[in-house]
């Protein structure tokens, strides 16, 4: 086994504490098999990729997901602290949160529901489909070898449908309630000393969630509606009796601001998606924001417009009143990395191709694949430091820096090449007449695997 393979396996090693020794061998086999196989991420596909298609006790590998007692929450905690080492101890922890739909059918999949498919829907047409809804929390981190910030999932929770919870006589939790619970869990992991910033899309701009974030010392960054209810701070009246007002007079909304003249617009150059710089105009202020009939809370809002007129106006908010407008804008831009992560987990790690039917296996498989995405990125960081990570070039697509597909391809190359070299002569034509012929034959097999991948 060469040093690069040992580096890859050492990144998986911290999770061995979750299993017994026999179970960990099976778990490691399935993890490496999930990395190597290029088709559906089923147990059988992983075993075939590992050369175990003749394994008589294959059912024990299925038991690892649907019977063996190990905690996905503890696995999330381990992965969280592995990712936490990427940033310095005094830097804020930037987390992204969003929900994604795993399209699944079948009578035995109990937790599925009927949801709007955001990927297939448009402004003029809404497409709904059956599937499993997942709430995913991820680190936002910018590797030195990538132009954009990448989202590294570490915490995935299945949101069962309301019908499923009613059948089980359980209390149904909304997405915002699950989000509050995840925030509380992360805060328990890191303590109160670290600063945490949570970034979500417009669906998370809810007053109740903002209050929960404030209770746990978490800053929330999100997008507001153009007609958001903005209020001035209440005036102090010491001699007035009765209950003190919670908010002042109502302010104009963002739609009305765009029609007004004489506002103090400022220009700013920001780093957009994929490292491309843009010049935008913005206006910002601090006021009270009231929503959902709850107590108004102070926020810092930023209204961003594109001088060229190509993009729609974007109103953003932050519960941290001291956060700079540039940081708020760039944090929300980096949120798009989570959408890219969802697509790449489907494209390269086979999310939605699993075939598990039991409730426990369903609750475990997708979080494993989401976490595997982050582990592959950690492997890419180690390989880049050793000069083994290169961007694939082709005639129609020139890449300046590696992407996730390049990292995964390099990891597969190392695992396969080490596997072939360790069994020298087995794959050679006519049994292999020389070591040089064996090396050439194995290199040709590796090239064939890379092209197929």
Image (spheres, rainbow, N blue to C red):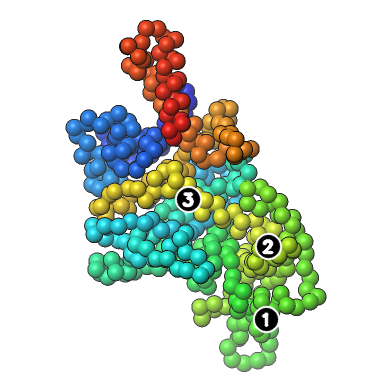
Which of the two labelled residues, at mark 3 and mark 1, occupies the earlier sequence position? 1
Q: Nearer the viewer, residue 210 or 302?
A: 302
Q: Are marks 2 and 1 in contact (CB under 8 Å)?
A: no
Q: In the rendering, at what x and y percent does residue 401 appear? A: 61, 38
Q: Is residue 55 left or right of residue 84?
A: left
Q: What is the CA distance from the residue labelled 2 to the residue labelled 1? A: 28 Å
Q: In the rendering, at what x and y percent does residue 265 appear? A: 77, 68
Q: Residue at x 66, y 68 (%)?
A: 313
Q: Is residue 165 left or right of residue 262?
A: left
Asked which secondary structure carries label 3, the reply is: helix
Asked which secondary structure carries label 2, the reply is: loop
Which of the two labelled residues, at mark 2 and mark 3, occupies the earlier sequence position? 2
Q: Residue at x 27, y 30 (%)?
A: 52
Residue 189 in view here: no
- Disc ID at residue 428: none
Residue extending farthest left: 56
Judge depth for marks 2 and 1 and give the one in front: 2
Q: Which residue is mark 1?
A: 251
Vertical position of residue 363 compared to residue 248: above or below: above
């Amino acid at each position: 086994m060469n040093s690069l393979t040992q580096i890859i396996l050492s990144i998986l090693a911290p999770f061995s504490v979750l299993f017994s020794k026999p179970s960990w061998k099976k778990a490691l086999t399935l993890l490496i098999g999930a990395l190597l196989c290029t088709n559906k991420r089923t147990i059988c596909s992983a075993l075939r990729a590992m050369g175990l298609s003749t394994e008589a006790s294959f059912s024990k590998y299925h038991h690892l997901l649907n019977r063996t007692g190990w905690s996905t929450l503890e696995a999330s905690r381990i992965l969280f602290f592995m990712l936490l080492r990427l940033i310095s101890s005094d830097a804020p922890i930037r987390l992204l949160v969003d929900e994604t739909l795993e399209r699944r059918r079948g009578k035995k999949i109990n937790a599925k529901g009927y949801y709007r498919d955001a990927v297939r829907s448009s402004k003029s047409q809404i497409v709904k489909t059956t599937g499993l809804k997942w709430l995913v929390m991820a680190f936002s981190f910018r590797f030195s070898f990538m132009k954009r910030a990448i989202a590294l999932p570490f915490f995935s929770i299945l949101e069962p449908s309301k019908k499923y919870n009613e059948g089980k006589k359980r209390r149904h939790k909304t997405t915002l309630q699950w989000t509050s619970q995840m925030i509380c869990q992360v805060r328990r992991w890191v303590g109160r000393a670290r600063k945490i910033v949570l970034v979500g899309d417009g669906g998370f701009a809810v007053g109740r969630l903002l209050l929960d974030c404030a209770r746990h010392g978490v800053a929330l960054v999100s997008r507001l509606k153009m007609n958001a209810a903005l209020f001035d701070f209440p005036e102090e009246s010491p001699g007035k009796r009765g209950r003190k007002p919670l908010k002042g007079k109502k302010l104009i909304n963002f739609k009305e601001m765009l029609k007004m003249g004489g506002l103090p617009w400022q220009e700013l150059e920001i780093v957009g998606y994929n490292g491309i710089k843009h010049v935008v105009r913005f206006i910002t202020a601090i006021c009270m924001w009231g929503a959902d009939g709850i107590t108004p809370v102070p926020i810092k809002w930023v209204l961003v417009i594109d001088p060229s007129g190509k993009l729609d106006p974007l109103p953003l908010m932050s519960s941290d009143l001291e956060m700079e407008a540039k940081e708020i804008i760039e944090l929300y831009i980096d949120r798009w990395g989570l959408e890219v992560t969802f697509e790449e987990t489907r494209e390269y790690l086979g999310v939605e191709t699993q075939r598990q039917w039991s409730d426990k296996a369903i609750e475990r498989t997708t979080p494993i694949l989401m976490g595997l995405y982050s582990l592959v990125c950690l492997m890419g960081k180690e390989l880049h430091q050793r000069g083994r990570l290169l961007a694939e070039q082709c005639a129609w697509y020139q890449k300046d820096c590696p992407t996730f597909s390049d990292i995964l391809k390099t990891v597969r190359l190392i695992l396969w090449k080490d596997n072939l070299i360790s069994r020298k002569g087995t794959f050679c034509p006519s049994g292999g007449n020389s070591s040089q012929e064996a090396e050439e034959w194995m290199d040709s097999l590796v090239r064939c695997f890379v092209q197929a991948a």
